[in-house]
Image: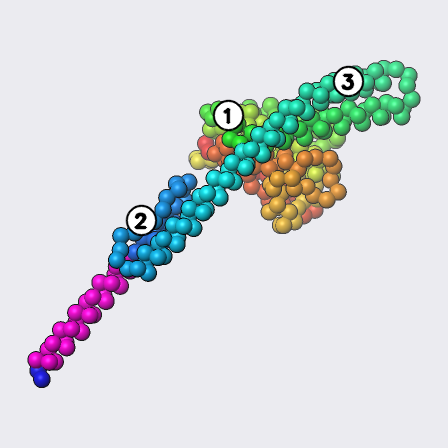
Amino acid sequence: MLVLFMVLSAVLLSLLIWQKIEYRTLEKNITYISSRLESLSLTSENGFLLLSTDCNAVKRLGASINRLLQEFYTDKAEFKRSQKAMAQVLTNISHDIRTPLTVLKGNSEILFSKAKESSLPESFQTMAEKIDQKADQLTTTINDYFTMSKIASGDLILNLRKENISQICHDTILDYYDLLEEQQFEVNIQIPSVPVFADTDKEALQRILKNLMDNVIRHGGSGKYLGLCLNTSEKSVKIQIEDHGKGMSPQQQKQIFTRNYTTAGKSFGSGLGLAIAKSLARQIGGEIQVYSIPDKKTVFSVILKS
């Protein structure tokens, strides 16, 4: 009887040890699967699970996950091909339209100039002015689509280096001086007297700032206020552009950088200006944030690495 008890105890102990080993092996495999999937989600690597186990259930799980990963990688590659093809189509269309548009713009400027110099009726002069304005708007729209297509296709070439951000801000706001004065804007500029440097592409940053200022004039013009403030810290440089227009709701703030997003009742535009600014900010290693209080103010912040 004692012998039987000892045998049963030994068998039960063996089973317990075996189950413990199996449990630890299963836990190890699940931990590996979890960490591997997390690693794949953080990189662009097209990797798979490599499992070494005798557990059929874990083998089936790993095989199913690998099939899903393969389908995902195939869909991702197809999406990238489609995106690049669409970007190329937009680029070709932009090129095709630019030449006749340049001719149209040139003729509209001549027409407007002649209309002002002659004794033609005021209605004709107004019509010539509108044609010239629409030619400008169409040129801006085509340029926006052209820029966005280059960003999407990866064809945009940037030259990242240390740039004087103070000077870039000065030069950009100077380009808008006449327009802001004509529209009677209150302008508040706070730029340090000493140079402030950050890693950026000069042309890309100028485009970002101009798109943000265009947005102020087009959508925040009711407040007749434009503020530009340049702040610096140990790790970053922040450019803030502020207006006192009607502001945005929290929902609008979430959508404002979306391609082709336009607010109701606004003037002609592609809806790409802020999307381009956001994309360019990422390209130069920065970011754009927006903060708005409806009917009070809106502040766009461009943050760069110093």
Q: Position of residue 67 (x, y in %)?
A: 41, 50
Please state if 74 lies on the left or on the right of 94 as rendered: left
By what rule are the colours in the image chosen?
Answer: rainbow
Q: Position of residue 202 (x, y in %)?
A: 53, 25
In this figure, what is the number of numbered marks?
3
In 3D space, how far apart are the residues under numbered discs 1 and 3 (Cα atoms)? 33 Å
SS at mark 2? Answer: loop
In the rendered structure, which segment of residues is drawn in magenta? Answer: 3-28
| For residue 215, above or below residue 164 | below
Residue named by callout 3: 107
Q: Nearer the viewer, residue 108 or 149?
A: 149
Q: How many other residues sit within 10 Å of disc 1, few (<14), some (14-19) or many (≥20)?
A: few
Q: Quadrant of the N terminus?
A: bottom left
Look at 58% across and 27% down and name the residue there: 206
- Can residue 237 be seen in the rendering of this structure? no
Please state if 263 lies on the left or on the right of 254 as rendered: right
- Can residue 6 be seen in the rendering of this structure? yes
Mark before the other along the chain sequence, 1 or 2? 2
SS at mark 3? Answer: helix
In 3D space, how far apart are the residues under numbered discs 2 and 3 (Cα atoms)? 66 Å
Instruction: Specify whether residue 78 is painted magenta.
Output: no
In 3D space, how far apart are the residues under numbered discs 1 and 2 (Cα atoms)? 38 Å
Residue 50 marker: 2
| For residue 236, above or below residue 110 | below
| For residue 193, above or below residue 276 | above
